[in-house]
Image (cartoon, grey):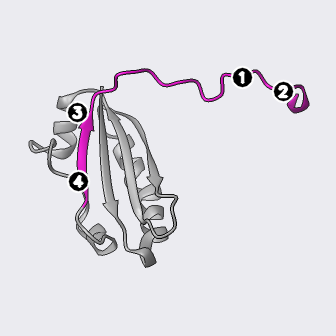
Amino acid sequence: MIVRIWQAEVSARRADEFCAQLTEDVLPQIFRTEGCLGGELLRALADGDHRVVMITRWRDEDALRAYAGPMWRIRPVWAEGELNYLEHPPTVAHYLPLSAEAPADPRPPSPASS
């Protein structure tokens, strides 16, 4: 598995609109791509930080090459209109996972929630 991290700095006045577009249009298309194993969209929490990060997990290099083209290692994928939302072109990096995911909440449910 390969983890692809796409990151962009979004214009402050268009951040909500851009995140909505990614959530409603872009991510569902990516998730339907052969070899995509899932992912998530993250938005910076700090005030004044308008970075958006999209983390996707891919079966292998062949799947990434089919999605992003032969220069998948260095070329971020974005639609022409998305550049209107961004302060700078996006960047992309790839990682190999070295550990498994932890359970969402390993604690048993409390008696009050039953």
Asked if residue 108 lies in the magenta stretch, the reply is yes
* Secondary structure beneath label 1: loop
Q: Is residue 41 above or below residue 36?
A: below
> Residue 31 versus residue 76: which sits nearer the camera?
76
Q: Are marks 4 and 2 in contact (CB under 8 Å)?
A: no
Asked if residue 103 lies in the magenta stretch, the reply is yes
> Residue 55 versus residue 45: which sits nearer the camera?
45
Report the residue marked by disc 4: 77
* Image quarter (top left, top right, bottom left or bottom right) of the N terminus: top left
- Residue 7 is left or right of residue 13, and the answer is left
* Image quarter (top left, top right, bottom left or bottom right) of the C terminus: top right
Q: CA distance from mark 3 to mark 2?
A: 42 Å
Q: CA distance from mark 4 to mark 2?
A: 44 Å
Q: Position of residue 105 (x, y in %)?
A: 65, 28
Q: Is residue 85 above or below residue 24?
A: below
Q: Which mark is residue 63?
A: 3
Q: Amino acid at mark 2?
A: Ser
Q: Which mark is residue 110?
A: 2
Q: Which mark is residue 38?
A: none
Label 1 environment density (alpha carbons within 10 Å; few <14, some 14–19, many ≥20): few
Q: Amino acid at mark 4?
A: Val
